[in-house]
Amino acid sequence: MNVASQPALEGAAPIDRSARETVLRMRQIDKTFRGGVVALHEMNLDIRKGDFISLLGPSGCGKSTALRLIAGLMRPTAGRIEWEGGGGKDDLGVVFQEPTLMPWATVEQNVWLPFRLQGKSLGSCREKIYEALALVGLENFGKSYPRELSGGMKMRVSIARALVTDPRIILMDEPFAALDEITRQKLNDDLLNLKAKTDATVVFVTHSVFESVFLSDRIVVMAARPGRVVKEIEVPEPYPRGIEWRTSPTYATIARETSDTLLGTLSPGAEVH
Amino acid sequence: MAAVDSSPSGAPAPQLSDISHAVDLEEEQIARRKRAEEIGKWALPIIVMAAAIWFWDRIVVWNEIPHFILPRPGLVLETLWADRAMLFESLWVTVKITALALLVAVVGGVGLAVLFAQSKFAEMSFSPFAVILQVTPIVAIAPLIFIYIESKLVGLLLCAWIVAFFPILANTTLGLNSADHNLRDLFRIYRASRWQRLIYLQLPSALPYFLGGLKIAGGLALIGAVVAEYVAGSGGIDSGLAFRILEAGYRLNIPRMFAALILIAGTGVLIYALTSLTSYLLLRKWHESALKREQ
Ligand SMILES: Nc1ncnc2c1ncn2[C@@H]1O[C@H](COP(=O)(O)OP(=O)(O)O)[C@@H](O)[C@H]1O
Ligand SMILES: [Mg+2]
């Protein structure tokens, strides 16, 4: 890391995260778009098994670009992205800002998609599909069409699809940003429950300080122009986390620290437009 | 986020029994208007059509117009019945050409659209031809076609196809390219093959567009079949309705012209109804266009 990770608070529950095995390494990643926009400059990130990492920063700081690089949708200008043990199928699940469901397919068929593209029949995957749907509380909606569901429910289907293959990393790009506050809070709670149950590895993009502290165990604070990592902040609170977590002093302290770091990146010259 | 944390506060909720069920006049009015519209949707066209036919009949009687200039509606119906063997045989010919042309247009239009979607260069190379075929009036092309092509049936088919296939090609191409960008990315992340992307993503995305094109193409195929037969002109055992109209015109058999016209119009309406029904059945589960709006 450019900036050493540091525990945010003395005496917090000790979890030895360094013992986790690394899944993916980003080394000195640069991405420069045509026209000279430096979307990312020298980004380093280790994603370890079971991490819940938030990429936090103002818009335009390269958060989506980082996700697209990890997803293999674009290649870095310089630097290396290495999957531990090489890449393969079932590496990734993705949740976008919109639910991104196929409107012509039922919920069950939508969740089936990653398996279907591997050539597996619906029947052979049904058990896994309904397991994933049960995790997001939609096991009774398998035969529904997306248009019959509310915005929050569609998002849950999208999450079920992302985790149905039990991928090595789940990428989420501001997944709840388009939802109303109440639904969003509910989904955040549910995401934490999911995390506690499945121990999935998640990279979560957000521009909400509170969301990042509430959800993640590592916050990667980023700044724009050029897009870069300014600090990594550890959140040493174990999962499962509940309502008490959001009102605890530790939460408040870390939120404060994160907020200050974020504000520090917004020097007058580099203000978001 | 704090909004959720705060315990529910404020005034206690009113008991259900406290709420009186006053009649909302505006809502009542809206409901009444809706019922009227529901009935009017069916009743009005029938009434107006009947009135128009009655008026047609009256005009002929009041002005004592001779039947070889404008026949009374009753006489048209009589002619339709009297000449039914010949007229329906011709109708069958026209329907056959229209349906076949539409079928080939669907296969050709969708096939070409899929090719265009696979390769931008193919699209750049061939789409000018499609546009030229589309913008040149079929009556201008038809004489040439009948010079080069011996079989009248094949010639007619070709003409009908030329007019019908463009809306299918254009709409399907648009539809194939309209697949959601995030879904495309998702397919790439899941390492879908080109073929899988086409079958599972692009074709379903294109379906509503294709069906829109089909509705237009159905009508155009009929127009193409009729117009081309006017140009071809020659008669024979396999004459379609257009030739019957021409022939009846030469003989000043106006009632038969009307009878043939009614059959052509009826066929057009039927094609439209069938393509609309197909579209509804295929899309009703998921597409906005086929959904009844709530409220
Ligand atoms: N495909 C692209 N071509 C050119 N510039 C891009 C492209 N994608 C992103 N950018 C630019 O790169 C910067 C970072 O974008 P992005 O990663 O989307 O930021 P974020 O997701 O943090 O809001 C922005 O200035 C954006 O305009
Ligand atoms: Mg973004």
Image (cartoon, rainbow, N blue to C red):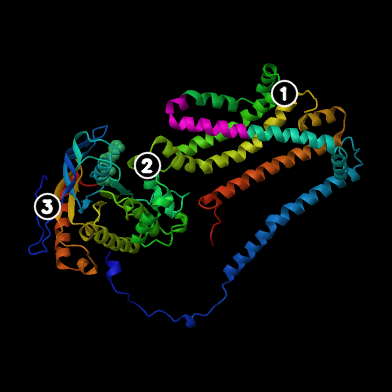
Circle 1 sits in a helix, a strand or a loop, which is it? helix
Give the magenta part as a residue range.
B103-124
Residue A199 occupies quadrant:
bottom left
Instruction: Identify the residue under disc 1.
Output: B152
Q: Earlier in the sequence, mark 2 or mark 1?
A: 1
CA separation in Å, label 2 and label 1:
48 Å
Residues under numbered marks 2 and 1 in contact, where contact means CB atoms less than 8 Å apart: no
Instruction: Identify the residue under disc 3.
Output: A18
Category of crowding for the residue at label 2, using alpha-carbon neighbours closer than 10 angstroms: few (below 14), some (14–19), many (at least 20):
many
Question: Is-magenta flag for residue B95?
Answer: no
Amino acid carrying mark 1 in the image: Lys
Amino acid carrying mark 3 in the image: Ser
Residue A235 occupies quadrant:
bottom left
- Dot label at residue B187: 2
Q: Principal SS element in the magenta part?
A: helix
When the figure is inspected, residue A193 is found, relative to residue A159, above or below; the finding is below
| Residue A249 placement, left or right of A127 | left
CA separation in Å, label 2 and label 3:
34 Å
Whether residue A269 is visible: no
Q: Which one is in front, A33 or A9?
A: A9
The chain that hosts pointer 1 is: B
Amino acid carrying mark 2 in the image: Phe
When the figure is inspected, residue A182 is found, relative to residue B195, above or below; the finding is below
Where on the image, by quarter, is ligand 1?
top left
Q: Which one is in front, A53 or A127?
A: A127
The chain that hosts pointer 2 is: B
